[in-house]
Image (cartoon, helix red, strand yellow):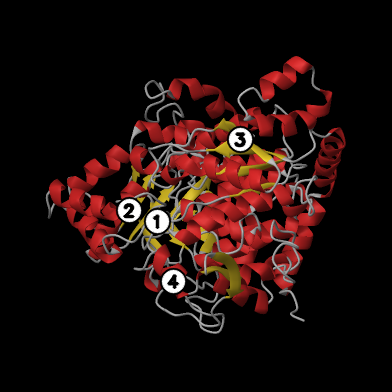
Amino acid sequence: MTVLNETIARVTERIVDRSRDSRRLYRDHVRQARETGPERAHLSCGNIAHAFATSPGTDKAKQAAGTSGNLAIITAYNDMLSAHKPYENYPEVIRAEVRKAGGTAQVAGGVPAMCDGVTQGRPGMELSLFSRDVIALAASVALSHNVFDGAVYLGICDKIVPGLLIAAATFGHLPAVFIPAGPMPSGLPNERKAKIREAFASGDVERSVLLRAEMASYHAPGTCTFYGTANTNQMLMEFMGLHLPGASFPNPGTPIRQTLTEAAARRALAITERGPAYTPVADILDERTFVNGIVGLNATGGSTNLLLHLVAVARAAGIALRMEDFAEISSVTPLLARIYPNGLLDVNHFHAAGGLGFVIGELLDSGHLHPDTTTVADSGFGSERGLHAYTREPVLREGELMWRNGPSASLNTDVLRGISDPFMNSGGLKCLSGTLGSAVMKVSAVPEDRLAVTAPARVFDSQEGVKRAFKAGEFDRDVVVVLRHQGPKSNGMPELHGLTPILASVQARGHRVALVTDGRMSGASGKVPAAIHVTPEAMDGGPIAFIRDGDSLCIDARSGRLDHSHERAHTDPSPDLSAGPNLDHHGTGRNLFSLFRQHARSAHEGAGIL
């Protein structure tokens, strides 16, 4: 029997102890909700008529009688997100499969789902992070009708899955299955795409060349193929046991994807209280499951956005996570994957090389994962229980869906490696602290000789200012670019990975360059050292607000330091904390989010209001 890694065990126990009171209160609320149950049996005739007015006759009779399971479908479908386009017809598929299994399903509600790829670098991005909490609220409104025995969640991308998870945890007495749609087929090779982006940033190619490259990269329905937040979300749903095993990365429009969707619908009905294997999501989302998710995040070099999201989701389940938990787990978790932008190959190559089943199997064998967590697959897939079921992969044999053992070795060590030969001996995440406060850095793609940078600061309050300075040649030297007023209270903490090509271009010229910001970078910080999520943020009067051009800054991922050579907070007048960009917040709906900005938690607390 494999022994659990000592550090993983210690961190888990610390989280359990820290969360004891809040978790007990959460479980009490879940128990009360379960005892109350769906209100179908207690509704007036008028209430019932409204709830099931549009259902077919056979469904309507079952729903009104309350004799079989009724599933809520929460969908984030829209045409704007390539990842969510396949969801257009999923409700029809789900209703049909559930009906065959003797139950019913209704689209309970839709939630907003914005494409960060469209809003990147634009004012609309200032709503992106807060949309997570809007999604949680919208899903809760849908579920508040309280006529459901379980729920299926159709969501993939950046803020959508975390928002849906917060809602699922809030309705913890209901079973929940998350149903993915898969990544688009691979397009333009990532190495070529990255070079074109850097060439455009340097002015060496025309915009038409860049546009052709981007259109060749993002070209079809399905998730973008780089390892950003969307695909990190899908990884987490397997590590946390909320997908069917192996469901994350088969492509849209394939027979295996269609069959997995049908199987997920049937499974969601089976784990309701009216089915044979009642599994409320509160039983799945325990402390061990979140630790497994953090291990997966580090082992695959996933998006730093999940540092924000996992903290917020865990809070909804009565669990208190801290940055120190992520750091300690990272220190003992080997990096087993290098998916673009951490490497040159994309998520389709990763999946073909062995994918999540191989990674989970390696981490189980090495004692880095809790093997006995509850999952939606328990008792439904043979003798395998807990995470061991997720080492298997789905296949179609004569049209029938089956699971077989995954590969015992990587089929491409450029993108996926085993525990005996990892890309790094520790995870791709570092926590930094010092006189500038605390921050995090994703280092899985940063060259070893770039993990520590000491250079003069060049300070900005907007992305546009950084771009103008670059075009003016101000970065033709060693430099630490400081971009402040990008935190949740300033402007909603927009993603800044549009700066990556600029900074990568400077680094490629041989200069030492780094980024320090109270904003965020998603999974796309790549090979440039970036100290992100700086806390306290500038709007809270954090030390980042006092940095001046020319100050010497030290960012050292090896020692975990983030230091400023001047203690200006003790000598200079307080900065004008209202001096950041766009603080009138008009346009693209930003004015409607003033309460979010006013009440936002810090980045280390999840950067939301819930």
Specify which label sits upstream in the sequence, 4 or 1: 4
Q: Distance between the residues labelled 1 and 2?
A: 6 Å
Specify which label sits upstream in the sequence, 4 or 3: 3
Mark drawn on residue 352 = 4
Crowding near the residue tagged with mark 3, few <14, some 14–19, many ≥20 C-alpha atoms within 10 Å: many
Q: Residue at x 27, y 64 (%)?
A: 189
Specify whether 287 is left or right of 549: right
Crowding near the residue tagged with mark 4, few <14, some 14–19, many ≥20 C-alpha atoms within 10 Å: some
The percent coordinates of residue 224 (x first, y second) are 38, 53
Mark drawn on residue 24 = none
Amino acid type, mark 2: Thr
Amino acid type, mark 4: Ala
Specify whether 279 is left or right of 423: right
Mark drawn on residue 525 = 1
User: Of circles 4 and 3, which is in front?
Assistant: 4
Crowding near the residue tagged with mark 1, few <14, some 14–19, many ≥20 C-alpha atoms within 10 Å: many
Specify which label sits upstream in the sequence, 4 or 2: 4
Q: Name the residue under label 2.
A: 500
The percent coordinates of residue 504 (x first, y second) are 29, 59
Specify whether 111 is left or right of 485: right
User: Of circles 4 and 2, which is in front?
Assistant: 4
